[in-house]
Amino acid sequence: MRRRQVIAAFAASAALSAPPILRAQTRFRLALTPVFLDNDARVIEQLRAALSEGTGQDIDLVQRRTYQEITGALLDGSVDAAWVCGYPFLQHKDQLSLLGVPVWRGRPLYRSYLIVSAGDAAERIEDLRGGMHAFSDPDSNSGFLVTASDLARMGETPDGFFSRTLFTWGHRNVVRAVAGGLVRSGSVDGYVWEALSVVEPDLVPRTRVIGRSELLGFPPFAARTDRIGDADVAALQRALLGMNGTATGRAALDLLFLDRIAAPDLRLFDGIALRMAELGQDG
Amino acid sequence: MTRRTFSRIPITLRVALAMGGLMIVLGLVASQQVLRSLSRLHDDRLREIARLHVGGLSVALGPLALHKDVWEIYDTLDRARTASDGQRMLFTVVADDRNRVLAASDPLRAPIDSDATRYSEDASDLAALTASGGAPQVRVRAPLLVAGRRVGQIVTEIDVGDLVAERRRVSLFLLLANAAATVLLACAGYVLVARMLKPVTLLTQHMDSAGGAPGRIPEAEIPESDTELARLLRRFNTMTGAIEARTEAERRLAERERFVSLGRLSSSLAHEINNPLGGLLNTADTIRTYAGRPEVVQSSAELLQRGLLHLKDVSRAILEENRLDRSGTPLRPSDFDDLKLLFEPEATRKAQSLDWTIRADGAALATLPAAPLRQIVLNLLLNASAAAPEGGRIGLDVTAQEDAIELAITDDGPGLGARDLDRLMSSVPVAPGGGVGLRLVQDLVAGLGGRIRHHREAGRTALVVRLPSGRA
């Protein structure tokens, strides 16, 4: 695909003599899963600026609606690297390699939260039977896998336990769905929920956390294993790991409520792999 | 206000009121028209707002409703609500083709899978939307179509409080402005009409001046322009002059009629004087012939004295009849003696017999003035005598009643003609000639507040004059 585009670009440049198109095709593309602030242009721009500065080249940040689209783009080479969830990373760990893991509140770990609306009397997941439930994405660890595996431990499936489940394609949307009363409960990324409570103080207090998962590996940065040796991928990894060392990088991390990006450690994702195994999936 | 009451109002006020009324009707019609236009304008604007809201949403939501994508529908509604200009969109429900709720902007109010009929049944279609109800919010529904297929419907509540308030404000302002304009126009109309009709008011005032008689309008008060009204006023003055001249002529005629009656009597009275004169001259000869016979002289002197006294009475009666300054003298029984003295020779000349009955004492008669009474009785007697044949009968019967004196004059003539009755019984204008002084009698009786009755019975004509007491 990429080769074909390059050829097409050359053909176009030969025919039309259009260098901007040629240059656009050479940019490094980093895909982002729908993280908490994917709707905040300021955060995206700051992150792009930090990584462009760190790598010494223009970086395109690519956003898609679902995790599956991001993973697919990463696997087929449409993007050069991606900030993915631990769950799809493990699903494709034979093809993907870690570049770095964000450190939040001192650890490269986070939790999944089970939330209900602020006025709801539910205290445990068992109280939510028969209600409507919002997941973030079927390929999200905190927004699906954790609750699905919790229910599996109870001998239940999401569709059997809840009256209706729906995917909102974003952790922020799960909070909105619960806060607005569309659904009774939701599965959300604990890091996103905590960050949103600072950024959107009108939204988050309308929800209440009734369940927190164990600490699990924070969504990592990954690239295709066969491209790990590429210079631009290596440059990205250096930029990621050194982000907290530059002012631009520091500013981007602050906006993301992250401490830094740590060197990868596959063992961080053992918890997720365990839950995958409980659902009969190969982690 | 009844018709009579309205017709009693002065014409200037009536015309002004009519003008004011017309202005009010005009104002009402104009206000109604403007309000209707305003209402149409508001409805158009409301429909446009609703169309923008619902139209945009239904295009976006159609495919989502087709796939029953609850989250995307909610997300769209939620974003539309927060992005809605001035938070106009209050509440929106999207239902599937079986009218079950797919999602609502407020899921607590319309939970997923609940029945959406209660939202859609009292909602109006886009084309029928109107703000005329005055409700601060309207509910509108629209179908969700995908490739021409109905996949559900959208019901949305739109806040139109600002439109309704604006409509109310504009309506109120309009009504106030129209009311003010109407009042202004009515006032201006009144002033204008009153000014235009000023000559009419002037005319009315002078028409009634001086106790019912029309009076001249001073030339200074007549507008200088040669308008119809100015000409009318001048013509009125001319007519007033004519009326005054006519009244004066009538007065002179009446004065003359007083002498006519005496004129009629003159030949009889001349005989009345002449006849005794022959006797008196004989008596004087007798005295001269029998100067030495005291008893003859004595009886002749007495005869002479009686004759002279009679002449004296006759001349006194004539003088009395002609006296002009006796208006204040009350009626006495002797006045009837005078009348008899004056009239009897006329009756005698025509060999007519006279029934003379006075059934009223001095006190009853004294309540009436002598002069007009004598004139009335004498004129009627002369007419009766003229009407009665030779050897006929004429009667005068005076009776005193509780509050009036009645004079009945009868004759056995052929009766009064229509023209004479007009003269006597009414004040309509009549041609000169005919019965003697009948119009004078009518005027005198009217002046005394009396009435004249006429009836004819068994070949006799009777005229009964009833005069209320206390006019002396």
Image (cartoon, rainbow, N blue to C red):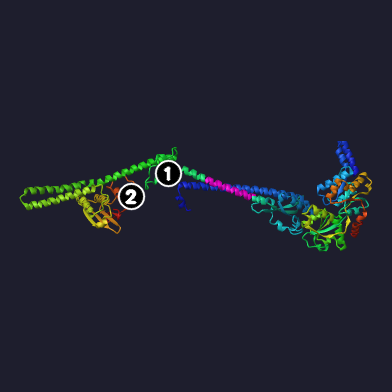
Q: Amino acid at mark 1?
A: Leu
In the rendered view, does B354 fall on the left or right side of B136?
left
Alpha-carbon neighbours of circle 1 within 10 Å: few (<14), some, or many (≥20)? Answer: some
Circles 2 and 1 on the same chain: yes
Residue A53 in sight from this viewpoint: yes
Q: Position of residue A251 (x, y in %)?
A: 84, 47
Q: How many marks?
A: 2
Camera-side residue: B172 or A217? Answer: A217
Camera-side residue: B359 or A215? Answer: A215
Asked if the residue under mark 1 is in contact with the one under mark 2, i.e. CB atoms within 8 Å, the reply is no
Highlighted range, magenta: B166-186
Res. B426 mark: 2
Q: Position of residue B71 (x, y in %)?
A: 79, 54
Upstream in sequence: badge 2 or badge 1? 1
In the rendered view, does B264 fall on the left or right side of B53?
left
Camera-side residue: B246 or A209? Answer: A209
Q: Is residue B183 magenta?
A: yes
Instruction: Please report, as a chain letter, where disc 1 is located.
Output: B
The quadrant holding residue A49 is top right
Instruction: Please report, as a chain letter, where disc 2 is located.
Output: B
Q: Position of residue B212 (x, y in %)?
A: 37, 47
Nearer mark to the viewer, of 2 and 1: 1
Residue B67 in sight from this viewpoint: no
**Furthest residue to the left?**
B292
Label 2 sits on a secondary structure element that is loop
Q: Is residue A4 magenta?
A: no
CA distance for labels 2 and 1: 31 Å
Q: Amino acid at mark 2?
A: Ser
Q: Main secondary structure of the magenta part?
A: helix
Label 1 sits on a secondary structure element that is helix
Q: Position of residue A250 (x, y in %)?
A: 86, 48
Res. B202 mark: 1
